[in-house]
């Protein structure tokens, strides 16, 4: 049984106006579907509606088990405690966590509702695999009700050092929640080390043998599927359409992100501004395309970020006009269709991933998987988990804008042979260490932990 904050489900209307549920083709579905095929797997989560229905849905081999949540619970649990408290707490990039007792109360309540749903559905001696920081208390609640089941948890985002985490007044409860697991997975070994230190600091009486098995399981993508999709005629046609609309510049720099302060979007735009100012490129020879899907628009810090990005882009485009009138920075502030996103990966010459903190960053891996002819340069922040797996990228400390500018300049002068060598190795590594490997490894360890 998989447990996540949202069910992998979307809805569309058919020709009669009826609402039809569809399984969303997200990364987690791609990872787990092959591993769980034929196992009678269930998936527990909120379905994104306020209908109050908890009627199960059977889609493509999964039994989807909705948890009914009120608008207030969503506001306090998701927008409040999860994304205004825990998100900044775990990413630790200088944004202070906000806190409300009402948020914590609903975080507790929602985690209990999820746990109850799990316990009502999971088979005897079954396996429960909980996903991410929105549900850190679920393992303990499930364990208290169903001691027969094996419980795994995967933390998709960074886990900072113990001193930082311990500053949160409910840190001990969060750690107790995860302490009930058989297996706790993280993206990097440093996250594992921080978690273990935090457990022992907040619970000094806990013996090492009673700690859950914790290890690094770097998540990945369905590399073959991305590669195949990126070679489709409609994607290639869209890529050419993009290039033509931008005046076929010599250099296309690309950033693709959810609009979030952890992604280093302002840093990369400021670096591109420095690149233009240096004269290494002009608005006629280069364009920076920033695709940003809106995120958490009701949260003040995200509204502030959006205003900061708008201001930088306006200044750059005003200061560095092109002869044709095409802006130096093209801002695609929307949720792009998958075809369009893949086309951006295909048309880009330089992908800039400048995260200030990132559990992994799968965009970097998708860009690589889309590069069929071994062209293109990946600039990758050392603060993204992907950097540990992708050493052939141009690695950079994304907190230092001038360093980002320097690696942009390095990308401009890199010889074609070196570019091809790096990209070929990156593609090979992503193909080998794909999402199926991730799912098989962590679920295999969970199975072994259960036997032990």
Image (cartoon, grey):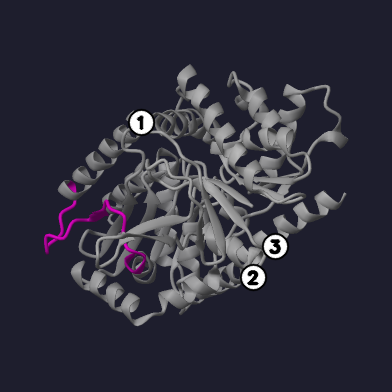
- The residue shown at (67%, 23%) is 172
Could you tell me what secondary structure mostly forms the magenta stretch? loop
Q: Are marks 3 and 1 in contact (CB under 8 Å)?
A: no
Magenta-colored stretch includes residue 320: yes
Q: Residues within 10 Å of mark 3 (few under 14, many from 20)?
A: some
**Which residue is the site of mark 1?**
301
Q: Which residues are magenta?
A: 319-340
**Number of the front mark, 3 or 2:** 3
Using the numbered discs, state the Cα–Cα distance from disc 3 to disc 2 in whole angstroms. Answer: 13 Å
- The residue shown at (77%, 27%) is 200
- Which is more N-terminal, label 2 or label 3? 2
Determine whether the residue tagged by mark 3 lies in a helix, strand or loop: helix
Question: Residue 440, labelled with which disc?
Answer: 3
- Which is more N-terminal, label 1 or label 2? 1
Residue with the most extreme bottom position: 233
**Which residue is the site of mark 2?**
432
Question: Residue 226, labelled with which disc?
Answer: none
Using the numbered discs, state the Cα–Cα distance from disc 3 to disc 1 in whole angstroms. Answer: 38 Å
Using the numbered discs, state the Cα–Cα distance from disc 2 to disc 1 in whole angstroms. Answer: 38 Å
Q: In the depicted view, which residue is nearer to us: 64 or 295? A: 64
Determine whether the residue tagged by mark 1 lies in a helix, strand or loop: helix
Q: Percent from the top left, x then y, of residue 354?
A: 45, 49
- Give the vertical position of 80 relative to 59 (above or below): above
**Number of the front mark, 3 or 1:** 3
Determine whether the residue tagged by mark 2 lies in a helix, strand or loop: helix
């Amino acid at each position: 049984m998989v447990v996540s904050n949202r069910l992998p489900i979307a809805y569309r209307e058919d020709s009669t106006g009826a609402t039809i549920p569809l399984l969303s083709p997200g990364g987690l579905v791609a990872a787990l579907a092959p591993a769980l095929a034929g196992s009678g797997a269930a998936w527990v989560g909120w379905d994104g509606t306020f209908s109050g229905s908890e009627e199960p849905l059977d889609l493509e081999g999964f039994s989807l088990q909705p948890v009914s949540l009120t608008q207030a619970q969503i506001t306090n649990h998701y927008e409040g405690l999860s994304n205004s408290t825990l998100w900044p707490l775990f990413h630790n990039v200088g944004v202070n966590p906000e806190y409300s007792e009402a948020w914590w109360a609903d975080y507790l309540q929602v985690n209990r509702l999820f746990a109850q749903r799990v316990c009502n559905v999971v088979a005897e001696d079954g396996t429960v695999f909980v996903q991410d920081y929105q549900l850190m208390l679920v393992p303990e609640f499930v364990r208290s009700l169903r001691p027969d089941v094996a419980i795994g948890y995967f933390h998709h985002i960074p886990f900072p050092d113990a001193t930082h985490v311990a500053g949160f007044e409910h840190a001990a409860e969060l750690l107790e929640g995860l302490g009930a697991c058989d297996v706790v997975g993280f993206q990097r070994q440093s996250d594992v080390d921080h978690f273990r230190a935090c457990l022992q600091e907040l619970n000094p009486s806990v013996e090492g043998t009673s700690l859950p098995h914790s290890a690094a399981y770097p998540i990945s993508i369905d590399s073959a599927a991305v590669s195949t999709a990126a070679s489709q005629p409609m994607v290639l046609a869209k890529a050419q359409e993009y290039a033509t609309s931008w005046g076929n510049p010599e250099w296309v720099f690309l950033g693709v992100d959810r609009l979030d302060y952890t992604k280093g979007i302002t840093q990369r735009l400021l670096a591109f501004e420095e690149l233009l100012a240096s004269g290494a490129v002009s608005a006629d020879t280069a364009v920076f395309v920033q695709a940003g899907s809106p995120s958490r628009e009701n949260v003040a810090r995200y509204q502030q970020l959006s205003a900061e990005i708008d201001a930088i882009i306006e200044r750059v485009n005003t200061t560095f006009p092109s002869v044709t009138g095409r802006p130096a920075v093209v801002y695609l502030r929307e949720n792009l269709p998958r075809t369009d996103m893949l086309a951006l990966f295909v048309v880009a010459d330089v992908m800039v991933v400048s995260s200030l903190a990132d559990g992994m960053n799968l965009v970097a891996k998708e860009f690589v998987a889309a590069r069929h002819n071994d062209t293109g340069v990946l600039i990758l922040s050392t603060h993204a988990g992907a950097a540990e797996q992708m050493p052939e990228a141009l690695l950079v400390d994304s907190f230092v804008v001038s360093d980002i500018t320097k690696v942009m300049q390095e990308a401009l002068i890199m010889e074609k042979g070196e570019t091809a060598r790096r990209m070929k190795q990156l593609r090979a590594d992503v193909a080998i260490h794909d999402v199926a490997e991730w799912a098989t490894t962590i679920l295999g360890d969970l199975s072994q932990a259960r036997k032990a």
